[in-house]
């Protein structure tokens, strides 16, 4: 007889009603604790709902019930990595590969873990083996591409990075649309539609390529951006028309010969580490907004902006963001400085009143406001989020705090500077979770900077 709990849980799961599916699966598991189907659904749903410990327990039970199966070990390894139990995760990936040596995904997943551990040679071997098993694996190709980019091996890295468009297409363009994806064809007299992709920081970083795109001979370049960036990008060189995602634009595809996305432009430009478009600043604050917001920064002393947390929905936010503002407490002791919070959204709890810190969040309505205030600061100290990219694009000095775990490929490996932003300095965690050492280095550097001559 069919298990009614399994039938119901499967239906809810395929409807993406993960909370309801998990609830149903758990009711079934109370009666049938070793039902493999219920354990699988519960494991998947708990992972989606960020109940990582519960998800890991489901896959561990499935692995015990099905000792010859590879999938439970692969899924459990993913969760163990999220929990920071990396040695166990590696062992489980290797157990999955032992059971299914031809499974490309397991090799690619192991490669991702090894890359996160900075075991780059082993990671590269895993990705290349995955591609040998499945040359069409978009995930393995993208993962290898990001690793090579992190290592500064741009020639091969950018081409492989294009595989991300097969893994997760950034936009939905009808296959029969007259506007075709640009693959390097001559642009003389042609029109190009540039669409947004990935995060706000990515779009700020790669908007520098629009003048290059225009220089390829395009008669018209149209940029589509997020609403919060529209005023910021209004003066961007190389753009003939600027649209927000929310703007009405009937017939937009039909009005252009080609479309592309911002993160594909470095590949088409054959960018190498020594040929990154580095005309900084390439974004500029609006003078009227600067004048209107300048009183918020008035006063003596060097002005230092702070951003200590990024978007909580980011896949690595637990590692890239600081747990709370108190971690930066040693900075308050540096004399002659005034601190300003550019943390958006503002923290749920009010900032302590005894700190030398002015909250600017109420005055930040879009990125143009942020740019106007950043331009009036002497330095920004930030975790890896869009504000740091904006400072870099404006030419504002930025000290960037980077996690040891899954540091983004664009900051390369081990460097203390960035070829993307000449006035950005990198402070890296020595080990996962150890922000104390970073803040100690930061405090010493800040004291030296505060005692030196004004820029």
Image: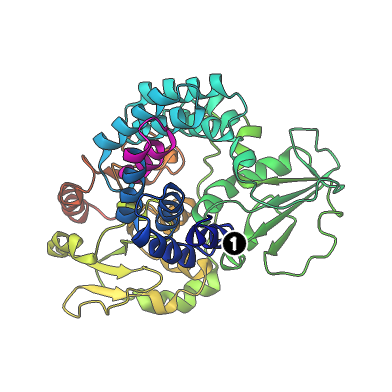
Residue under the image location 46 percent in, 49 percent down: 37
Q: Is residue 355 above or below residue 278?
A: below
Q: Nearer the viewer, residue 288 or 355?
A: 355
Occupied quadrant, residue 97: top left
Question: Looking at the picture, how far across and down is residue 144, in whole percent?
Answer: 49, 29
| 446 on left or right of 373 | left
Front residue of 202 and 292? 202
**At x 55% / y 67%, what residue is drawn?**
286
Looking at the rendering, the stretch of residues picked out in magenta corresponds to: 64-81
**Mark count:** 1
Q: Is 402 on the left or on the right of 146, as rendered?
A: left
Say which quarter of the image contains residue 362.
bottom left
Above or below 348: residue 112: above
**Badge 1 is on which residue?**
15
Q: What colouring method underlies this structural image? A: rainbow
- Helix, strand or loop at mark 1: loop
**Mark 1: few, some, or many residues within 10 Å (few <14, many ≥20)?**
few
- Indicate the position of residue 310 as horizontal and vertical percent values: 38, 60
Q: Is residue 413 visible?
A: no
């Amino acid at each position: 007889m069919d298990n009614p709990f399994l039938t119901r849980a499967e239906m809810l799961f395929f409807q993406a009603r993960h909370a309801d599916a998990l609830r149903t699966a758990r009711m079934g598991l109370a009666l049938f604790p070793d039902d493999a189907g219920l354990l699988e659904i519960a494991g998947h749903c708990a992972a989606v709902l960020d109940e990582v410990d519960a998800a890991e327990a489901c896959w561990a039970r499935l692995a015990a019930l099905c000792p010859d199966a590879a999938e439970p070990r692969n899924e459990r390894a993913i969760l163990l990595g999220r929990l920071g139990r990396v040695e166990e995760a590696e062992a489980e990936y290797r157990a999955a590969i032992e059971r299914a040596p031809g499974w490309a995904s397991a090799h690619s997943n192991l490669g991702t873990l090894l890359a996160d551990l900075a075991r780059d040679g082993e990671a590269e071997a895993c990705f290349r083996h995955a591609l040998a098993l499945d040359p069409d694996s978009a995930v393995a190709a993208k993962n290898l591409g990001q690793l090579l980019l992190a290592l500064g091996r741009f020639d091969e890295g950018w081409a492989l990075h294009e595989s991300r468009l097969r893994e997760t297409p950034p936009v939905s363009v009808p296959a029969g649309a007259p506007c075709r994806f640009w693959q390097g064809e001559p642009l003389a007299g042609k029109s190009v539609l540039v669409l947004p992709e990935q995060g706000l920081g990515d779009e700020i970083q790669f908007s520098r390529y629009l003048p290059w795109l225009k220089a390829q001979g395009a008669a018209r370049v149209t940029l589509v951006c997020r609403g919060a960036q529209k005023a910021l990008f209004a003066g961007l060189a190389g753009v003939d028309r600027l649209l927000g995602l929310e703007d009405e634009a009937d017939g937009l595809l039909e009005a252009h010969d080609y479309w592309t996305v911002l993160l594909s432009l470095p590949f088409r430009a054959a960018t190498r580490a020594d040929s990154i478009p580095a005309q900084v600043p390439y974004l500029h604050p609006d003078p009227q907004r600067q004048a209107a917001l300048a009183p918020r920064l008035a006063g003596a002393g060097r002005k230092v902006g702070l951003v200590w947390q990024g978007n909580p929905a980011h896949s690595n936010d637990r590692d890239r963001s600081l747990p709370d503002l108190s971690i930066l407490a040693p900075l308050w002791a540096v004399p002659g400085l005034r601190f300003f919070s550019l943390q958006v959204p503002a923290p749920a709890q009010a900032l302590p009143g005894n700190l030398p810190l002015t909250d600017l969040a109420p005055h930040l309505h879009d990125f143009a406001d942020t740019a106007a205030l950043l331009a009036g600061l002497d330095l920004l100290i930030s975790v890896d989020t869009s504000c740091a990219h904006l400072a870099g694009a404006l030419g504002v000095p930025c000290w960037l705090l980077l996690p040891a775990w899954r540091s983004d490929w664009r900051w390369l490996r081990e460097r203390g500077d960035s070829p993307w932003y000449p006035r950005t300095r990198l402070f890296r965690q020595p080990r996962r979770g150890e922000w104390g050492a970073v803040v100690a280095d930061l405090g010493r550097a800040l004291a030296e900077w505060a005692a030196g001559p004004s820029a």
